[in-house]
Image (cartoon, grey):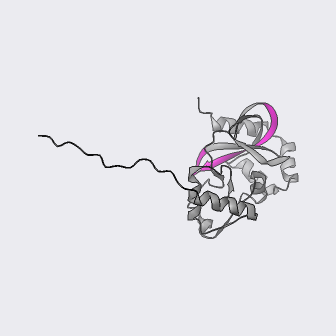
């Protein structure tokens, strides 16, 4: 399977968005300054018709129009997340490599010396001015990195429980052994 060109897909989605979409985002409670800043910044956002292809993934196609947000990690575009504004809790990823929105500058972000707010959905994350994190893949192996944060404010008891379970999930380890080498005679 060929890896999708995420930059092009994000650029195309941005080009497909209009003033109507911008006003719709603002009408959904996203601060005007946030929607505008995302638009001007390389983080971007856009709209695309997307098809659910299973396993929590989507591909551009003849499906319903969805909002697209980039998933950055340490300055690299690693995934896109798509959701319909009418059902923001049902999102899909493009590659399945993304862990969270809000990691564009990585784990060492300066304001994470304090409480990190966790948003329930990508739309909530936008409404929060893109502050904190929104987990987009609760099964990602890197989710354990969240345990390095000083404290995490969850939007509900259910999310706190889900986070606690994700952080305490047993990790699988590869076989570890000492390889004996034969001595030359």
Q: Residue furthest left?
A: 185
Above-or-below relation of 24 to 156: above
Q: Is residue 74 visible?
A: no
Magenta span contains residue 75: yes
92 vs 78, left or right, is: right
Instruction: Please tell me which residue is depicted at 74% across the width and 40% down the height of the picture.
Output: 14
Residue at (71% x, 64% y) in the render: 154
Image coordinates of residue 183 in percent, x first then y, are 17, 43
Q: Is residue 111 above or below residue 69?
A: below
Q: Name the main secondary structure of what is drawn in magenta.
A: strand
Q: Is residue 113 left or right of residue 180?
A: right
Q: Name the foreground residue: 108 vs 152.
A: 152
Does the image show residue 66? Answer: yes
- Image quarter (top left, top right, bottom left or bottom right) of the C terminus: top left
**Residue 153 at x, y = what percent?**
70, 67
Q: Which residues are magenta?
A: 62-77
The residue nearer to you, when weighing 166 against 43, is: 166
Residue 84 covered by magenta stretch: no
- The residue located at (69%, 41%) in the rendering is 56
Location of residue 145 with respect to 49 vertically, above or below? below
- Residue at horizontal 73%, vertical 32%? 60
Residue 9: where, in percent of width, then height?
69, 36
Where is the N terminus found, in terms of image quarters? top right
Residue 118, horizontal then vertical, whole percent:
70, 61
Q: How many marks?
A: 0
53 vs 66, left or right, is left
């Amino acid at each position: 399977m060929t890896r999708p060109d995420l930059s092009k897909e994000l650029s195309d989605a941005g080009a497909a968005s209009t003033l109507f979409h911008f006003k719709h985002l603002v009408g959904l409670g996203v601060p005007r300054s946030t929607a505008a800043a995302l638009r001007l910044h390389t983080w971007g956002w856009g709209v695309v018709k997307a098809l659910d292809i299973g396993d929590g993934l989507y591909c551009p196609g003849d499906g319903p129009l969805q909002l697209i947000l980039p998933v950055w990690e340490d300055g690299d575009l690693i995934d896109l997340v798509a959701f319909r504004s009418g059902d923001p809790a049902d999102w899909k990823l493009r590659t399945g490599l993304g862990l969270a929105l809000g990691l564009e500058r990585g784990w060492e972000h300066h304001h994470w010396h304090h409480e990190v707010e966790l948003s329930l959905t990508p739309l909530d994350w936008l409404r929060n001015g893109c502050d904190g994190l929104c987990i987009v893949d609760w099964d990602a192996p890197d989710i354990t990195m969240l345990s390095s944060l000083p404290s995490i404010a969850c939007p509900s008891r259910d999310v706190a429980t889900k986070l606690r379970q994700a952080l305490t999930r047993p990790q699988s380890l590869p076989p570890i052994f000492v390889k004996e080498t034969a001595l030359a005679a």
